[in-house]
């Protein structure tokens, strides 16, 4: 398994749509968490503190698998995000504790 990051950028109606889609979005992430595949997930906030996107760091089999996971996110399906970027990454810090 590799480490992948997907960054969702809210569209113009993102804040409005988040309210009605949030529970489904969290339920989808909870499925990944139950499989111990989420390393980090949370909202991105603008200068006023309002959500403007999300970052999700997951373990997946491949970039294609990570994209499939992001494509299934209700925030993508329901149009909260106008754009999603998916990247392979690797942890450099924190270093493993000995």
Image: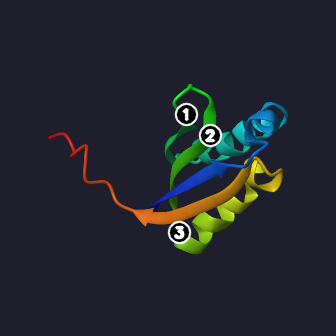
On residue 19, the disc is: none
- Mark 2–mark 1 contact, CB under 8 Å? yes
Image quarter hosting the C terminus: top left
In the image, residue 63 sits, relative to residue 42, either above or below, namely below
Which residue position holds label 3?
Answer: 61
Give the number of the disc on residue 45. 1
Count residues near mark 2 (Cα–Cα under 10 Å), then give few for <14, some for 14-19, many for 20+.
some
Residue 93, percent across and down? Answer: 25, 47
Q: How many marks?
A: 3
Find residue 52 and name its label.
2
As measured in the structure, the alpha-carbon distance from the residue carrying label 3 to the one carrying label 1 is 29 Å
Counting residues from the start of the chain, the first of labels 2 and 1 encountered is 1
Q: Residue at x 74, y 35 (%)?
A: 15
Q: Residue 96's quadrant in the figure?
A: top left
Q: Is residue 39 left or right of residue 12?
A: left
For image coordinates 52% across by 46% down, the residue present is: 36
How would you rate the neighbour count of disc 1 (Cα within 10 Å): few for under 14, some for 14-19, many for 20 or more? few
Question: The residue tagged with tag 1: helix, strand or loop?
Answer: strand
- Tell me if residue 45 comes above or below residue 77 in the rendering: above
Locate residue 45, reporting x and y percent. 55, 34
């Amino acid at each position: 398994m590799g480490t992948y990051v997907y960054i969702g950028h809210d569209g113009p109606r993102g804040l409005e749509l988040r309210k009605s889609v949030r529970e489904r979005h969290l339920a989808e992430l909870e499925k990944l968490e139950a499989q111990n595949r989420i390393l980090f997930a949370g909202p991105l906030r603008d200068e006023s503190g309002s959500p403007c996107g999300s970052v999700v760091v997951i373990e997946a089999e491949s970039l294609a698998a990570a994209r499939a996971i992001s494509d299934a996110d209700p925030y993508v399906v329901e149009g909260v995000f106008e754009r999603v970027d998916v990247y392979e990454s690797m942890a450099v810090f924190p270093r493993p504790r000995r």
